[in-house]
Amino acid sequence: MRLILNILWLLLGGFAMALSWWLAGLLCFISIVGIPWGRACFVIGGFALWPFGREAVSRHELSGRHDIGTGSLGTVGNVIWCLVAGIWLAIGHLCAALGLFITLIGIPFGLQHLKLAGLALAPIGKTIVTAR
């Protein structure tokens, strides 16, 4: 079932949003300072391409220990990210979600876009894992 949902996802906006994430990642790689954000964009772009069966979780919850992205520097990084690029990716996901919520079959896809919109606002300190 996940395979079918992921294939439909590609056709209903998933591919376009993954390209948006990858474009943001390329723009982040232009400067040396943006490389950590760029790496996160490529990981989340892969998640945006194939989201069913996977989820984003906090690295602190997963490992039980703090690292540079889950502490105060991660919070500062998320604020900078949100102001520079995160808000635009979140708006794209919200627009796609609203369009999909109009139809009954689009509701699960709209929910995925809402999860990705939340992730777009604060990606630092998160990792993508297989859903349980």
Image (cartoon, helix red, strand yellow):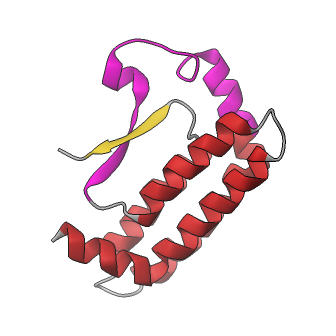
* Residue 51 place in picture, x, y as percent: 36, 60
Residue 94 visible within the image: no
Q: Quadrant of the N terminus?
A: bottom left
Q: Residue sitting at 34 percent across and 23 percent down? A: 61
Q: Is residue 48 above or below residue 71?
A: below
Residue located at (75% from left, 47% from top): 28
- Residue at 36%, 72% (x, y): give it: 109
Residue 72 in the figure: left or right of residue 106: right
Let me know if residue 38 is in the magenta part: no
In the rendered image, the residue lying farthest to the top is 65
Residue 91 falls in image quadrant: bottom right
Q: Determine the image quadrant of residue 62.
A: top left
Q: Find the magenta span and give its range.
A: 53-80
Q: Quadrant of residue 87?
A: bottom right
Question: Is residue 131 among what the camera can see?
Answer: yes
Front-lying residue, 81 or 2: 2
Relative depth, front residue between 95 and 66: 66
Q: Position of residue 104 (x, y in %)?
A: 29, 85
Residue 59 vertical placement versus 27 (above, below) = above
Horizontal and vertical percent position of residue 71: 57, 16
Most extreme residue toward the right, as rendered?
A: 31
> Residue 128: where, in percent of width, then height?
39, 43
Magenta segment includes 76: yes
13 with respect to 40 (left or right): left
The residue that appears at 61% across and 42% down in the rendered structure is 39
